[in-house]
Amino acid sequence: MKNIELPLFNRSIVITRSKDQISTVKSLFQNQGAKIFDLPALVIQYPDNLKPLDDALREINEFHWIIFTSSNGIKFVEKRLIDKGLSLKNCTKTLKIAVVGEKTSQSLKDLGIEADYIPPDFIAESLVNNFPMSGYGQKVLIPRVQSGGRNFIAEQFRNAGANVLEVPAYESKCPVSIPIETIEAFKRKSIDAIIFSSGKTVKNSAFLLEKEFGREWLTMFIDVKLFSIGPQTSQVCKEIFGRVDKEATKYSFEGLLEVAIDSL
């Protein structure tokens, strides 16, 4: 029987994501033959102050819509609701849910909930431009990261006449170090590509790499391809690295996998 070589066989790829979320992405690339090196660039936890989130959740059924822009928003809102003897599923009788992103949509499905609205493209602009109704008079809750996230959706809904409440539901911080195996791979110059899934993973990875390799760290990446999950991530890549080699057309890790297969 003929052996069919896996498309990423013998390719070394660095994944930058939060430590507890790398495993599923890792297997996606490993199944195509890639050797994966972890560079956890985020530590996800509750925000410093839970009172704004708790106050909003106490009145969750008074909102018309809740908009989730990330799986972490769903995870930490659900976790906090469960602590109070509630759940998102219990709230969907009166509350409608919109999501940005395929992974975010799947996280909602994992709770047994179908989103009321998913934009045709998995970016904030698509949600705003294609929203199925006017925002005027709507009361909208947007759980978000404590620091560093975009407030584009909130601004656009406010401009449309909606009453928008943004609350920090989680915080993403920078880890303190890079795994030894990944450091050694960089030293050997055996890395073919790095994939970035958010602007924060770009910034935190750069911070950790400079911390490890010193001021000349960028010279180590001349031959390493940089792949971005979408426009905002690409923008940060260009600001820090001066380039992005390819951006996913499908804003998901499956899209990043397609980019890697096409480019390596």
Image (cartoon, rainbow, N blue to C red):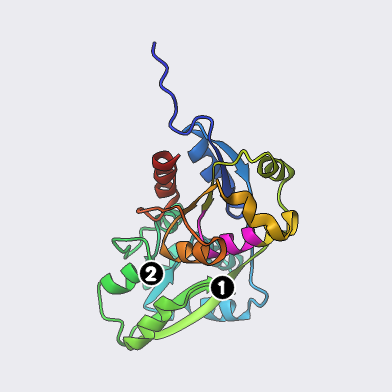
For badge 1, the amino acid type reads: Gly
Which residue is the site of mark 2? 124
**Is residue 176 among the parts visible in the rendering?**
no
Q: Which residue sits at x=53%, y=67%? A: 239
Q: What residue sits 47% from the left and 57% below the top?
A: 244
| Amino acid type, residue under disc 2 in the picture | Ala
Which percent across, then down, holds residue 144?
A: 52, 72
Q: Which of 59 and 29 is in front in this view?
A: 29
Mark 2 residue element: helix
Front residue of 176/45: it is 176
Our reading of the magenta stretch's main secondary structure is helix
Instruction: Look at 41% across and 46% down and name the residue there.
Output: 259
Residue 65 magenta-highlighted: no
Q: Give the range drawn in magenta.
A: 196-206
Splitting the image into 4 quarters, where does residue 211 fall? Answer: bottom right
Q: Residue 148 bears which disc, if any?
A: 1
Residue 249 vertical position relative to residue 28 in the rendered view, above or below:
below
